[in-house]
């Protein structure tokens, strides 16, 4: 998988998915929690604290002995890792020379002490880093991981750490009626007609959107077509009800939308294979719409079509796995 491809996948370590930096062997200059902070790191050249220059990242002290520093991240949702980003933004004379990534898959909620002694396995061998750079590295393998360890050699600062991959939550909790489309349950976007202003993955993110930028917005259409997003569900399931939320889209909400479903990836390009889950229905701006679905066939993929264009904040596809 190329860098451009894996960067489109969800960040499994993000706070939005409830990721956490649970331990670091040293965080003298800047706290470990900054590693997974949302957004780009900030920098004020005039800002100093009693320990020195203030950085928006994780920074360890200069080592005077052998060894290296490391931080342990609990993924918000376990998953298969396709690539990582070790971003050294603003760290120029104090970035690590090299880094490596280890992973472990453990049940339950181990303590930081238990994780330090866990049976870690290499995910990414030692690679060279550049300063003030978003260093991106693809990862191979099909293992499911719950925690990752970022090793830096020998010391220094990292602004952000992103772990892109495919969510694989514990299936024991995917019972009853759940949001089959949610990223945190294993759903993902597989295609989209237009993502000019913002990512379609926003519509299956956790929680409510807080502003228009946290939804999916396409460009204004100047033809007779319409825009759409195709979502691969967490698994094959029966859809009970759906939610189409246009919150914060006031002058740019779709005029209407419909929802269809199909069973296999091979049927995605066969229009006749899609079954109607929700007929084309008028939408209001800035409104959380909920609709019952009466379908007697399970589906693995859903496609929301918006007419003719416009943004939506969230799509919830509530149902039961087969």
Image: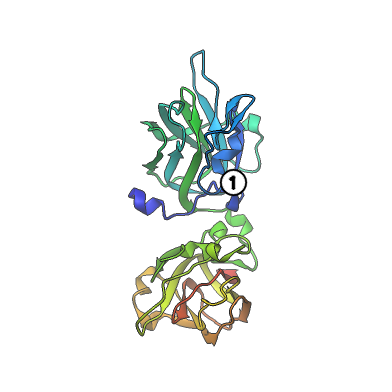
The residue closer to the viewer here, 72 or 269, is: 72
The residue closer to the viewer here, 252 or 120, is: 252
Q: Is residue 229 visible?
A: yes
Q: Is residue 117 visible?
A: no
Residue 6: x %, y % from top left: 39, 51
Q: Quadrant of the C terminus?
A: bottom right
In this picture the colour scheme is rainbow
Residue 296: x %, y % from top left: 54, 82
The residue closer to the viewer here, 23 or 217, is: 217
* In this rendering, position of residue 254 left or right of residue 243: left
Quarter location, residue 319: bottom right
Residue at point 46%, 35% (across, down)? 90
Residue at point 41%, 64% (across, down)? 190
Residue 222: x %, y % from top left: 36, 80
Residue at point 44%, 65% (across, down)? 197
Q: State the count of labels.
A: 1
* In this rendering, position of residue 85 left or right of residue 203: left
Position of residue 39 relative to residue 289, above or below, is: above
Which residue is identified by label 1? 19
Residue 105: x %, y % from top left: 54, 41
* Residue extending furthest toward the front: 46
Element marked by disc 1 = loop
- Assess disc 1: are there few (<14), some (14-19) or many (≥20) residues with their C-alpha within 10 Å of its C-alpha: many
The residue closer to the viewer here, 79 or 287, is: 287
Residue at point 39%, 44% (across, down)? 141
* Residue extending furthest toward the top: 65
């Amino acid at each position: 998988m190329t860098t451009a491809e894996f960067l489109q996948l969800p960040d499994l370590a993000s706070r939005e998915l409830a990721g956490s930096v649970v331990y670091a062997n040293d965080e003298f200059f800047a706290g470990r929690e900054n590693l997974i902070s949302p957004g780009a790191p900030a920098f004020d050249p005039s800002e100093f604290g009693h320990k020195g220059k203030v950085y928006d990242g994780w920074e360890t002290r200069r080592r005077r002995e052998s060894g290296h520093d490391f931080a342990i991240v609990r993924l918000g949702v376990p998953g298969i890792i396709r690539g990582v980003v070790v971003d050294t933004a603003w760290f120029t004379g104090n970035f690590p020379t090299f880094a490596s990534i280890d992973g472990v898959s453990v049940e339950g909620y181990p303590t930081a002490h238990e994780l330090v002694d866990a049976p870690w396995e290499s995910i990414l061998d030692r690679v060279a880093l550049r300063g003030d750079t978003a260093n991106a590295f693809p990862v191979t393998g099909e293992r499911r991981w719950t925690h990752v360890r970022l090793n830096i050699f020998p010391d220094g600062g990292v602004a952000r750490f992103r772990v892109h991959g495919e969510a694989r939550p514990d299936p024991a909790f995917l019972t009853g009626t759940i949001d089959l489309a949610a990223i945190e349950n294993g759903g993902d976007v597989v295609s989209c007609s237009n993502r000019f202003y913002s990512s379609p993955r926003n519509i299956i993110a956790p929680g409510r959107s807080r502003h228009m930028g946290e939804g999916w917005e396409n460009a204004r259409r100047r033809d007779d077509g319409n825009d759409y997003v195709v979502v691969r569900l967490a698994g094959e399931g029966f859809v009970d009800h759906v939610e189409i939320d246009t919150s914060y889209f006031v002058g740019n909400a779709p005029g209407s939308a419909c929802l269809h479903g199909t069973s296999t990836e091979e049927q995605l390009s066969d229009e006749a294979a899609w079954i109607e889950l929700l007929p084309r229905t008028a939408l209001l701006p800035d409104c959380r719409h909920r609709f019952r679905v009466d379908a007697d066939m399970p589906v693995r993929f859903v496609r929301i079509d918006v007419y003719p264009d416009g943004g939506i904040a969230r799509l919830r596809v509530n149902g039961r796995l087969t």
